[in-house]
Amino acid sequence: MNLFAAEQNLPFGIAFALIIGIGLLEGVGMLISLSPSNLLDDVIPDFDGDSGLDRVLGWLHLGKVPALVLLLLFLLGYTLFGYGLQMVARGLFGSYLPAWIAGVLAVPSGLATVRGLGSLVAHIIPRDETSSVSEQTLIGRVGVIVGGTARRGLAAQARVRDSHGRSHYLMVEPDLDDDVLEDGAQVLIVSKAGAFYRCIANPHPTLM
């Protein structure tokens, strides 16, 4: 118990308490359908640039893994390495390192845990695409008119599958003024204009 009660190990005790607290918050959130993880992800801005900060955050898998999961991984690595470091220091020198020295030395271990385990978690946790990304990736996809007849100025509904096999229902108009696309016609999405997509008759039926 000396290891956990020692003043020099206070940073790691706080980190361990945060792990427990976050776990309890997530548990309560599941009961009331309010996830702290989702709330945290909503307030964190997207980092899509090429600046040094963006590259560092990408290296830490921010945006690929929920931020709260990354925080838990950091706290886990930080806590385990910190206590381990203090046990080694106690065995070698007969006393623990000062709290601030041990706390600083444990930070790289926490970051390494985020980097290493974050990659594994990123492959396990399914990621939701944002609507803006989905809209762009649907351009060039093939679909079928499933509701009405599409004419220029009169949209019809088309079913299009994305690269993951999920179906999307879009309102489409012909890209060419004189085209009329009947119910059941195969179409190729070529652009997006406002709320509607533009399409042409599928020139390569084998794409379906």
Image: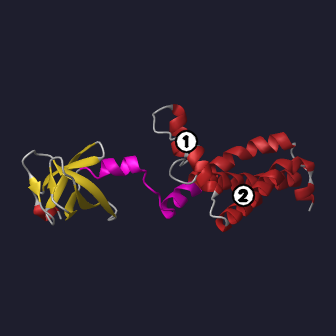
Left or right relative to 58: residue 106? right
The quarter of the picture where the N terminus appears is bottom right
The quarter of the picture where the C terminus appears is bottom left
* Residue at image location 43% in from the left, 50% down from the top: 130
Q: Amino acid at mark 1?
A: Leu
* Residue at image location 74% in from the left, 47% down from the top: 106
Q: Marks 1/2: CA distance? A: 22 Å
Residue furthest out toward the top: 51
Q: Is residue 145 magenta?
A: no
Q: Is residue 87 above or below residue 194?
A: below
* Magenta span: 117-139
Asked whether residue 162 appears in the rendered view, the answer is no
Q: Which residue is mark 1?
A: 57
Residue 185 image offset from top left, x and y in percent: 13, 63
- The circle on residue 22 is 2
Choose top left, top right, bottom left or bottom right for residue 18.
Answer: bottom right
Residue 60 image offset from top left, x and y in percent: 56, 46
Residue 132 image offset from top left, x and y in percent: 38, 46
Report crowding for label 1: few under 14, some 14 to 19, many 20 or more residues within 10 A (C-alpha). few
Q: Amino acid at mark 2?
A: Ile
Residue 141 image offset from top left, x and y in percent: 23, 55
* Residue at image location 32% in from the left, 60% down from the top: 168
Question: Foreground mark, 1 or 2?
Answer: 2
Helix, strand or loop for disc 2: helix
Q: Is residue 132 magenta?
A: yes
Residue furthest out toward the front: 154
User: Which of the two labelled residues, at mark 1 and mark 2, occupies the earlier sequence position?
Assistant: 2
Q: Is residue 26 above or below residue 175?
A: below
